[in-house]
Image (cartoon, rainbow, N blue to C red):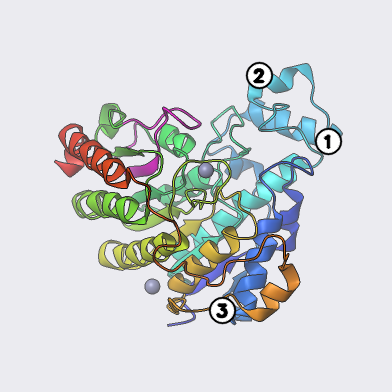
Amino acid sequence: MAGHALFVYSDAYQAYRFTPDHPFNPMRLAWTVELVRELGLLDPAEMLPPRHAGLDEILLVHSASYVDVVRELGRTGRASPIAANYGLGTEDDPVFPGMHEAAALAVGGTLEGADRIASGQALHAFNIGGGLHHAMRSQAAGFCIYNDVAIAIRRLRAAGLRVAYVDIDAHHGDGVQEAFYRDPDVLTISLHESGRYLFPGTGWVEEVGVGGGHGTTVNLPLEPFTDDRSFLEMLEGVLEPALSRFGPDILVTEFGVDAHASDPLTDLRVSTRFYWQAAAMLHAAAHAHCAGRWLAVGGGGYELLRVVPRAWTILWAEMRGTPVPLDAPLPEGFRAAHEDPEDPLPAWIVDPPGTVRPLERQAEVSGRNRATLMKLRHVCPLLA
Ligand SMILES: [Zn+2]
Ligand SMILES: [Zn+2]
């Protein structure tokens, strides 16, 4: 059914750009919109433009001193000695002109989606410019300045909703976890490449929350080279039991797509077929456990042209109730605009089985993931 989902985007998102050759490149957002439009998957009534979040909203998660520093550095566009105290002016998070406004727009996009769902005007919303899950209260980290998704969860809590957050980005959703580590009314679930091999180095099964929030943090670190089947098996193993015991009112999902085999920054090896299956699973979970309330945000994804537009188109198509057919070719218009004979585009939107060739040790990788899930069941009351 088209019409119950909103797509949050504006070309103003292009302003969130650290340096010309930084891997977090907003062109991937424009290319996603282009592909979605090529496929006829975006009615004008489904478009929701973002707005700039207000200071009061950003302060729901961030400290006043941090926000002051972001604003001041963004005014000059140059790092100062104080920047490093706040994770800024670093290789991952260089200072750029207008950084406060650019980051506030990502926050406002996620808040717009959250508010439409909380008020019942929409059932689902997807902010492709959101998902900045590494930002901490007083610290930029991992390409993230303001934590749009943690701020939106605070807003949903203020509306009285119990929130389940599910993060399938290849990196641990550490900033969101940290914001709600003591909160019994926010469940955070993160599946990610093990911190032994990948930034930010956290997200172990033993991180289960503290105080009243004990048991409402769930982490499943995955082995490098995890494939479609194993990632899906792990997601399934965690999602149903955790949601049915927690009883959320709304599902919030971080759909970073950097677990793809061709992503340059991580070692996981899924195909876009996994994203098709994961999107369907999360959609079903939102309807089964949250009366359909589902707020989705983007996140990581550094194979800018060949993966991100396809993976987020797959998610959006699922959300609006018109899933991409498994045999849908990449449309000619998109192909013509971007084809490089030296480096051809994929033939299909959903990678056919076998696109990512299994490794000899694939069974061992899956076995290790199963052992981690067993361990998680021992330490996590929700999964016991
Ligand atoms: Zn990531
Ligand atoms: Zn739906």
Per the rendering, the mark at residue 41 is 3
Residue 270 visible to the viewer: yes
Per the rendering, the mark at residue 191 is none
Residue 199 in the magenta stretch? The answer is yes
**Image-based side of 129 in relation to 121, left or right:** right
Among the 4 quarters of the image, the one containing residue 88: top right
The residue under the point 25% across, 31% down is 214
Residue carrying label 2: 85
Mark nearer the viewer, 1 or 2: 2
**Is residue 263 or residue 353 the one in the foreground?**
353
Q: Identify the element where label 3 is drawn.
A: loop
Residue 108's x, y, as percent? 62, 53
> How would you classify the magenta stretch by its main secondary structure?
loop
Magenta residue span: 182-204
**Is residue 30 or residue 259 the one in the foreground?**
259
Mark nearer the viewer, 2 or 3: 3
Up-down: is 339 above or below 372? below
Density class for disc 1 (Cα within 10 Å; few <14, some 14-19, many ≥20) is some
Density class for disc 3 (Cα within 10 Å; few <14, some 14-19, many ≥20) is some
Density class for disc 2 (Cα within 10 Å; few <14, some 14-19, many ≥20) is few
Which of marks 3 and 2 precedes in the sequence?
3
Amino acid tagged 3: Leu
Residue carrying label 1: 75
